[in-house]
Image: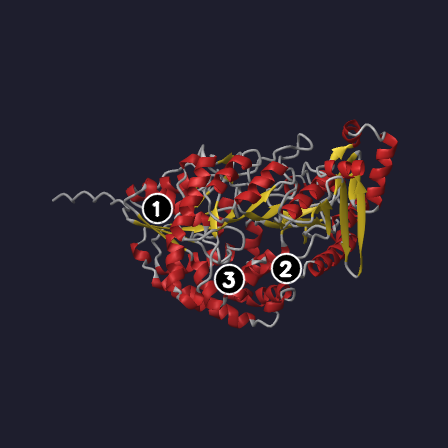
């Protein structure tokens, strides 16, 4: 008798895909990564069930929203907790990192790290055990900031329960050579998406359903397979040519979980939406310097800059707010499109919904765009201020100046838009002159909402990381804390997002202390002067038609009042947007250049105007803030 031919391998067919967002994203927002991927996969693969697990929300409810929020705001707090679970032998090192970071967070100072990690383990393991992974054909993890150790722990635990389950990971945490490095260090990860996820993930699901095993999946654009690890090749990205192909995000699973948590856990979430992907700031200082801000590594997963059409944006936000009965939205763009902003936000205003919007913008955003944003419901923005020294801004490759930063801070103050900006301290190569310029500008910025000081950190893929010598950096390696959280060999094999470096850090810490103190005092004064709900502007004016009254409020000092008559009033109002001296003298010829210059210098001496080069900017805002700018 002849032996029967071996049966051909059977397809790996399945009808369920699980998408997982591990801790620690903000619990009050559904994951836009999961929501967008689910909506896209449902449209492309309508016969497959897509389960989006916003597990971070469940953990937040279990350990307490306030505690969770405090942890989610600091990378090392977040990463140390699951690192202790992922590598129990490194728990002591993880504890030291957690306690060091927690000293700066009043709510966490007395928190017991051991009790917290045990609680997190119980909640995480219970969630993993409750999911039927045997009926799932693919588990996909979103790896973004603060999610690394949590995702790796979940992946390892899930693989222990379902060894045959294919796992794919992707996100902003890893790009380029770091993708195969992570896969080599964690054999539990079968695939990684490099770059944008929609098309690569949909194609991976199609291939997995017809393949005999995950190992039989061929190479795909935007997907790294285990078979490609030995070649060292990172596949080209496979992103959508246009965002017009994207459906609105699907957040049903997030809100289903929120209902299951019960009314005692209820809060008003903030919807996540996006208008664009990437960054349009592409100018370079020198040909060999990569485009974009010198410190930024936020757009490694995207190529170019794409944005949705105004009508698509309006329809999507109308659909999201109607479906989920909420009006607060965080626009997750790295940079909102400035030129298209008036039409986009004009259409949002036309929805006649009382929206509350947040977005990120450049300091060069025109005033008409700001007005359109405010009229549509933008109440909070993060502006790429980063510095108040033009000299330092050039080193940062921001393409902006100190007077432009003050101008947009002023316009936000006038329009009633909260500006949540950062001021970078300790940038490598910054010097005493940069600090002196910053301190000088700060004296004029005091009427406006203060930024938050942040110390420079080196990110993988940023222009500074790619050209360290240009910025006075002698050597670059993974941040030392990764060596504490991960086994030494693993910490050497993977290029992590946060990098350490040898340079002038010690000098920079000392150099920038006066700025940090000045900003702390600024924040204290601003809060005190705005303690009453209807507090007037710190520097505000009332217009009398042919005269102007300016009130200059000061902390622990008497308010000063200034009156400007006729031409002086007209010049001051003309400079509500920064103007060159030539433009001012051409507009107001009668007084003559000498008298105009003397007036402008008097206004600068009284800190009622700011001057940079030959440009002048009036600093007072209308007393009735939100009325105009």
Residue 9 location, quadrant:
top left
Label 2, label 1: how far apart the Cα atoms are: 60 Å
Residue identifier under label 1: 214
Identify which residue, 412 or 436, lies in the foreground. Answer: 412
Disc 3 or 1, which lies upstream in sequence?
3
The single residue placed furthest to the left in the displayed view is 1
**Residue 337 visible in the snapshot:** yes
- Where does residue 85 sit, x and y in percent of width and height? 49, 64
- Where does residue 35 sit, x and y in percent of width and height? 41, 48
Residue 406 location, quadrant:
top right
Q: Is residue 574 above or below residue 378?
A: above
Dot 1: element: helix
Identify which residue, 157 or 40, lies in the foreground. Answer: 40
Dot 2: element: loop
Q: Which numbered circle lies on residue 82? A: 3
Disc 2 or 3, which lies upstream in sequence?
3
The residue sitting at 30% across, 56% down in the picture is 134
Q: Are marks 3 and 1 in contact (CB under 8 Å)?
A: no
The residue sitting at 65% across, 67% down in the picture is 103
Identify which residue, 319 or 191, lies in the foreground. Answer: 319
- Where does residue 415 sit, x and y in percent of width and height? 63, 46
Are there few (<14), some (14-19), or many (20+) residues within 10 Å of tag 3?
many
Identify which residue, 86 or 571, lies in the foreground. Answer: 571
The single residue placed furthest to the front in the displayed view is 545
554 displayed left or right of 492: right
Disc 2 or 1, which lies upstream in sequence?
1
Dot 3: element: helix
The label nearer to you, 3 versus 1, is 3
The label nearer to you, 2 versus 3, is 2
Residue identifier under label 2: 533
């Amino acid at each position: 008798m002849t032996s029967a031919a071996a049966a051909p391998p059977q397809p790996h067919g399945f009808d369920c895909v699980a998408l997982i967002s591990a801790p620690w994203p903000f619990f009050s927002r559904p994951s836009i990564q999961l929501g967008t991927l689910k909506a896209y996969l449902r449209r492309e693969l309508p016969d497959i069930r897509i389960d989006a697990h916003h597990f971070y929300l469940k953990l937040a409810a279990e350990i307490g929203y306030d505690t969770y929020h405090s942890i989610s705001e600091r990378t090392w707090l977040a990463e140390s907790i699951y690192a202790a679970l992922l590598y129990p032998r490194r728990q002591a090192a993880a504890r030291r990192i957690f306690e060091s970071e927690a000293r700066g967070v009043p709510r966490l100072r007395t928190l017991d790290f051991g009790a917290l990690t045990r609680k997190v383990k119980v909640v995480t393991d219970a969630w993993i055990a409750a999911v039927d992974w045997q009926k799932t054909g693919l588990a996909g993890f979103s790896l973004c900031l603060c999610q690394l150790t949590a995702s790796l722990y979940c992946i390892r635990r899930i693989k222990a329960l379902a060894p045959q389950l294919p796992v794919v990971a992707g996100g902003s945490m890893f790009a380029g050579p770091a993708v195969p490095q992570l896969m080599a260090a964690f054999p539990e990860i079968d695939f990684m998406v490099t770059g944008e996820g929609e098309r690569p993930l949909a194609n991976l699901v199609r291939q997995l359903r017809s393949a005999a095993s995950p190992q039989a999946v061929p190479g795909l654009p935007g997907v790294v397979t285990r078979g490609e690890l030995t070649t060292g090749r990172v596949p080209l990205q496979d992103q959508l040519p246009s965002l017009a192909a994207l459906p609105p995000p699907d957040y049903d699973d997030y809100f289903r979980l929120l209902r299951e948590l019960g009314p005692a856990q209820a809060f008003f979430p903030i919807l996540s939406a996006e208008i664009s992907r990437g960054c349009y700031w592409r100018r370079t200082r020198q040909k060999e310097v990569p485009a974009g801000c010198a410190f930024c590594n936020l757009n490694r997963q995207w190529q170019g800059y794409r944005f949705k059409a105004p009508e698509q944006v309006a329809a999507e936000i109308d659909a999201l707010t109607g479906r989920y009965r909420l009006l607060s939205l965080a626009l997750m763009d790295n940079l909102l499109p400035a030129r298209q902003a008036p039409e986009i936000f004009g259409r949002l205003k036309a929805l006649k919904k009382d929206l509350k919007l947040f977005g990120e913008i450049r300091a060069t955003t025109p005033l008409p765009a700001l007005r359109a944003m405010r009229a549509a419901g933008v109440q909070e923005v993060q502006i790429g201020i980063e510095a108040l020294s033009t000299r330092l801004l050039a080193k940062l490759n921001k393409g902006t100046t100190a007077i432009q930063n003050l101008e947009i801070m002023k316009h936000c103050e006038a329009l009633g838009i909260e500006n949540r900006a950062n001021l970078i301290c300790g940038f490598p190569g910054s010097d005493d002159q940069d600090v002196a310029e910053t301190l000088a500008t700060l004296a004029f910025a005091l009427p406006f909402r203060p930024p938050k000081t942040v110390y420079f950190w080196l990110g993988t893929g940023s222009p500074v990381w790619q050209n360290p010598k240009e910025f006075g950096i002698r050597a670059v390696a993974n941040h030392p804390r990764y060596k504490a959280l991960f086994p030494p060999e693993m910490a050497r094999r993977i290029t992590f997002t946060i990098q350490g470096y040898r340079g002038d850090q010690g000098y920079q810490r000392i150099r920038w202390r006066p700025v940090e103190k000045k900003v702390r005092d600024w924040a204290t004064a601003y809060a005190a002067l705005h303690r009453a709900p209807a507090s007037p502007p710190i520097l505000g004016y009332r217009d009398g038609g042919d005269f102007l009254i300016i009130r200059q409020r000061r902390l622990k000092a008497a308010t000063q009042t200034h009156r400007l008559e006729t031409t002086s009033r007209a010049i001051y109002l003309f400079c509500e947007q920064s103007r060159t001296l030539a433009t001012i003298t051409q507009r107001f010829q009668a007084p003559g250049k000498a008298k105009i210059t003397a007036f402008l210098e008097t206004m600068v001496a009284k800190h009622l105007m700011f001057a940079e080069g030959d440009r002048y900017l009036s600093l007072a805002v209308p007393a009735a803030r939100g009325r105009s700018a």
